[in-house]
Structures are given as structure tokens and as C-alpha cells.
Image (cartoon, grey):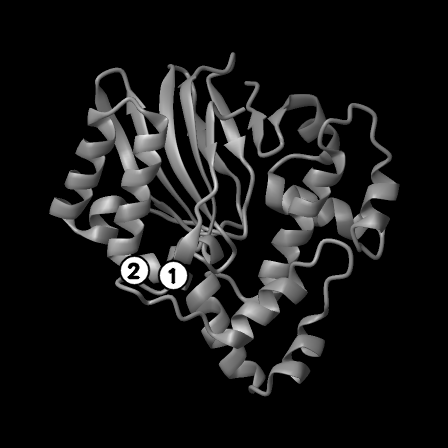
Amino acid sequence: MPTHLHVPSGPLADFVDLMWIYEGYAPPHARERLMPQPAMSLVITFTGDEIVWSGVSGPRTQPMMLGTWQSFSVIGVSFKAGGGFPFLRIPAGELHNLSVSLEDVWGSSRAAEVCDALFATKSAGRRCQILERALLASARSRFDRHPAVRYAVGELGHRSKPRPVGSVVEQIGLSQRRFIEIFRNEVGLTPKTFSRVCRFQHVLGHVEGLTDVDWTGVAYDCGYYDQAHFIHDFREFAGVSPTAYLRHRASRNHVAVCD
């Protein structure tokens, strides 16, 4: 679990889900899979007395491999779905399954200034304040989400009753082509793919904390039309079977790689 959590208020509240800090993350395995997410994140990683990496990860439809063979600390920002675009210089769709350095996003001088300030203080609260100010400065008051995207994110990603894409398009007054374009630019995924990744995450939430799982029941509860469809989607997104996920899960979104 993170050692510190912070939920921003003010204009950031509609775009940032959570700021978090891990101190001395040292799992008992050398590698792990980070499960796909429908939203972006900003991460600064420290090892010892240096910054190892800082950057932004786009929404993912593939697991990301993480090296965990040495202890490290992490400061992160988890954006809400479609919430990362005001803070970037590029369309969110260009970050699908990619991670780019903070220098590429904010420029070398600004990125260095923020990272140095974070590294210089050990106060968790102060670090969150530094990140909040950096995000506000990078956004330059561009807090103008397209209303169709805001509406669609809620409908397509609904936990219990997600709407089909076609049904959402009928409600927003845009052509399907235009809707897909603006949705991908802000969210980073097509509407259909976003809905699939959200459903996959709902599965992980459904089984969180459980050791004995009725996967057929989970598949039904999360909206899959048959077991084969569920298994196909799970393997595609997780990179492992549901049974292997449960066996090697370190947390909801982290799965140990056992060579």
C-alpha cells in the first residue's frame, strides 16, 4: 500500500484521481506486471540518492513490465480517465501503451526544476503541493474538457451498467467519426477500447482480496457474454490467465513474474 495518499481539491479535482507516494518499495520478486489502466499517470522514481526516471505513462491495453529487483521510492499522480490531457503538449492518443520522459512533456528545464524540488524535501505533504503547483502551471487554465467526452467516460466506464458505444453516440449529437476523434485525443483510447479496459479493471476490483473465485460468476457480473469471451479479454490485457493472476497477484494491479 502507498505510504501517503492525497486527493487534490480545486480545479485539479476534476482531472486528478489521486497523488500517492511509496517509500522503499521492495517486493520479494525481481519483476512484476503492471496491469493495463484506462487513464494516464505521472511518475517520479527514486533509488538511493538519485532520480531514476520521471515521466508520463499513457493509458494501456498491455501490461507493463517493471523491474523490482532493488528497493525504490515512487511519487505518482493517477489521473482520472481523460484527465491527463490538459497537462500535456501532445494528444493523449499518442501515448497509448507508451511512457515518455517528463522532459518530453514539460521541457528539460521545467522537468528538472520539479524533480529537484521533489527530491530536496522529504515531506509527503510538501511533495504533493509541489506537484499540484506544477500541474496547474502546465495546464495554463486549459480546464475545458469536451462535454461529450465527459459524458461518455461516465457512461462507457460505468461499473454496473456500461452503455454500448452506439447508444452513447446517439445521445451526444456528434457523428461517430468525430466522437471517436475527440475521445481519443482526450482519453488516449478509442471509446470501445476504453470500455473494454474499464470492464477488465472492474473484474480486478471484483476479485480484490479474494482467494477463492468463481470466475464464471465474475464474468457474468462484469458484463461478459460468455466464459470464452472473458478468458480471451483477460489474457489479452493481463498477459496471464485469471488463475495465474490470482496465484501471483501482489496487489490489484501488480502481478509477480515468476521465472
Q: Which residue is mark 1?
A: 85
Q: How many marks overall? A: 2
Asked whether residue 227 is in view, the answer is: no
The residue lying at 87 percent from left, 35 percent from top is 214
Q: Which residue is farthest top? A: 28
Tell me which label, 2 or 1, sits earlier in the chain: 1
- The picture quadrant where one finds residue 251 is top right
Classify 160 as above or below 6: below
Q: CA distance from mark 2 to mark 1?
A: 9 Å
Which dot, 2 or 1, sits closer to the camera? 2
Q: Which mark is residue 154?
A: none
Horizontal arrangement in the rendering, residue 161 relative to residue 5 (left or right): right
Classify 84 as above or below 45: below
- Give coordinates of residue 124: x percent, y percent: 36, 27
The residue lying at 53 percent from left, 82 percent from top is 177
Q: Quadrant of the C terminus?
A: top right
Q: Which residue is mark 2?
A: 139
Q: What crowding class fits label 2: few (fewer than 14 Cα within 10 Å), some (14-19), or many (20 or more)?
A: some
- Give coordinates of residue 149: x percent, y percent: 53, 71
The residue lying at 66 percent from left, 82 percent from top is 171
The residue lying at 19 percent from left, 33 percent from top is 117
- The picture quadrant where one finds residue 127 is top left
Kind of element beneath mark 2: helix
Under mark 2, the amino acid is Ala
- Give coordinates of residue 27: x percent, y percent: 50, 16
Q: What crowding class fits label 1: few (fewer than 14 Cα within 10 Å), some (14-19), or many (20 or more)?
A: many
Under mark 1, the amino acid is Phe
- The picture quadrant where one finds residue 53 is top left
